[in-house]
Amino acid sequence: MERTRRVRDGLRRRHLHEALFKGFGLAAIIAALGFVAILFTDVLIKGIPAFTQANLHLEATFDPAIIDVGPAPVRTAGQSDADFRAASLGWQRDVALLNWNKVVEASLRAAAPAGFEIDSRQILTVAETNARHVLREMFVNDPSLLGQTIKVDLLASANADNWVKGNIDRELGDAQQQLSAPARALIDIFEENGTISMGFAWSIFTNVDSRAAPASAGLAGAFMGSLFMMVIVILLAVPIGVASAIYLEEFAPKSRLTDLIEVNINNLAAVPSIVFGLLGAAVFINYFKLPLSAPLAGGLVLTLMTLPTIIIATRGALQGVSPALRQAALGMGASKTQMVFHHVLPVTFPSILTATIIGVAQALGETAPLLLIGMNAFVASIPATPLDQATALPVQIYLWQANENRNFFEARTSAAILVLLGFMILLNAIAILLRTRLERRA
């Protein structure tokens, strides 16, 4: 009886320990999912409002008294291309020297109630500072607008956008407000009569970053920079990493040299990313003289950082193939190369593809190595080639997070995070889709 009681007590303790272990594991999973949910909820709450933006619906008059410039040059018979281009550039230069702020001011005053008192400096704070450039480009593209009044949609300023969205405490005194009292009153009037309305913020996707006109700042330049870098990573890291893994796992002789290589690859996978940034700055920027802040340099740095991950994952996939498959292929008369490429490698394609996409997605979110090769520079253009100066999505998030206009850029930073997460989810979705198709074929 005593022995039976001890056995039962032992079983109860083991069952209790098992239940506790399961409970702690479940609690850990719930806690992890809870923290992830909190993170995503916070980003969504802050970022979604940034995808809407205040727009001004005005009637702009291209007053000849303000736009005092001669007619656009017309090409004459016998005029060379160089002469016509020089005449056109000279006319555009004269147009750019005009005071287009007066056109913007006149449009705003025309929309304001009769007798509303506000000075020129204050009323111009309602519209984004690049409004004058928008009107100027419209006139350059169509000089026949001179003397006409047309309806135009212009972005409201970042401060006006904050005021409309309620990001600014309206109870603060004038000294603590970013807009003057007349400007705030005019914005309220515009909001009531429909002159200001909220619309989708296409500028986030179509414009580059801007310091002079923050309301028009966008991610187009950073997106193209990241895209160029990911293309470089895929073209270099994937074939080199997979080929290296195949050689080390299937063909390399077992020796101290290969053991040393394997140890170093495993160590490189744990090296902080900032170290790769230092290596890239020393080798690619200082030694090979690649352009500073170019996607080519960034892509090469991220390639070095991604290679160990792809090599380790590919070797793990190759090790997971049953030895019976290799023996069967060799037994049927296949050479070792045929056995590897015709029988072993096709089986591992899904795992290799998944590991590759995960490595590329990890590289997409890296910031530290890119900062060290100068990709935190302000670039106001979309890169056309990997050699052009550019920034990247994670670096753009870093720059916006540090912007002094916190009321506006805090939401826009969260919106940029959502765009980056969307890009990474897209990469993972492609990996899952391709893996599913390859598994079906296998």
Image: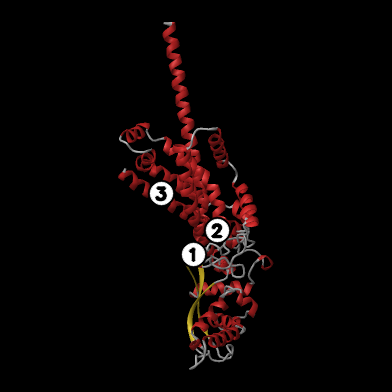
Up-down relation of residue 376 to residue 18 (above or below): below
Badge 1 vs badge 3, beta-carbon distance below 8 Å: no
Give the label on residue 296, or none. Answer: 2
Horizontal arrangement in the rendering, residue 343 relative to residue 271 (left or right):
left
How far is disc 3 from disc 2 in space, using C-alphas? 24 Å
| Apparent side of residue 42 relative to residue 277 in the rendered image (left or right) | left
Secondary structure of the residue carrying tag 1 is helix
**Dot 2: element:** helix
Q: Secondary structure at mark 3?
A: helix
Mark 1, residues whose alpha carbon is within 10 Å: few (<14), some, or many (≥20)?
A: some
Which mark is nearer the camera, 1 or 3? 3
Task: State the residue at coordinates (56%, 91%).
Answer: 64
Please state which amino acid type lies under the numbered disc 2. Leu
**Nearer the N terminus, badge 3 or badge 2?**
2
Q: Residue at x 48, y 74 (%)?
A: 194
Render colour scheme: secondary structure
The correct choice, above or below, for 348 with respect to 206 in the image is above
The residue identified by callout 1 is 205
Q: Is residue 20 above or below residue 110?
A: above
Relative image position of residue 345 (x, y in whole percent): 38, 42
Whichever of callouts 1 and 2 sits on the residue coming sooner in the sequence is 1
Query: Is 272 or 267 nearer to us in this picture?
Result: 267
Query: Crowding near pointer 2: few (<14 within 10 Å), some, many (20+)?
Result: many
